Image (cartoon, grey):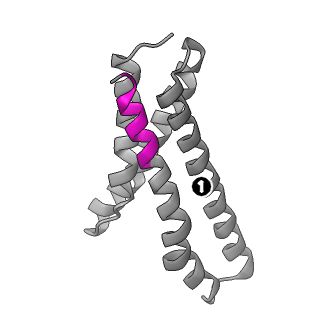
Amino acid sequence: MKNLPLKIAGVISFLTALIHTFGGQKDLIDPLQESNMSYQSTMEIIGTWHLVTILLFGTAFFLLKFGFRGYGRSNHNLLRAIGWIYIAGSVPYIAVSFKYGLLAPQFILLLPIGILIHWNLKYYKTI
């Protein structure tokens, strides 16, 4: 099936955005707001959190759109950039997991998305 890796990447990306939005809010952001951290630092972290939320939903939208409707040659660079962003975004979680001997599982979702995007670009040339 044409663009199947891109469709899978889009679904994983959308699910990641939902997990980030709802699970992360409950597990990370709510406790952060109740912490003794300075108001300035808290607001900057929360702003960054919401920026990531927007990026996750935005990239999921494009991945699903291009996966189901196809994409032209002019969209290759956009897809390639999204793929590299996901791959690069997984690296800090892998590094932290090794450094501290803990599992920072975010890379389990981020890395496959980037790999699937690049796999789709390589094997499913569309016009």
**109 lies left or right of 127:** left
Q: Give whichever of 102, 125 is nearer the camera.
A: 125
- Where is mark 1, residue-wise? 52
Q: Taking 53 as reference, is 99 left or right?
A: left
**Residue at image location 36% in from the left, 61% down from the top:** 96
Would you identify the image quadrant in which residue 44 lies?
A: bottom right
What quarter of the picture does the N terminus occupy? top left
Q: Where is residue 26 in the image (x, y as percent from the top left)?
A: 53, 78
Q: In this view, does 94 lie to the left or right of 71?
A: left
Q: Residue shown at 49%/50% (left/top)?
A: 14
Of all residues, the one furthest to the right in this rendering is: 40
- Label 1 sits on a secondary structure element that is helix
Dot 1 crowding, Cα within 10 Å, few <14, some 14–19, many 20+: some
Q: In which quarter of the image is residue 39?
A: bottom right
Residue extending farthest top: 127
Residue appearing at x 34%, y 61% in the figure: 105
Please report the residue visible at 42 percent of the width from the left and 35 percent of the height from the top.
Answer: 7
Residue type at mark 1 is Val
Q: What segment is highlighted magenta in the picture? A: 2-12
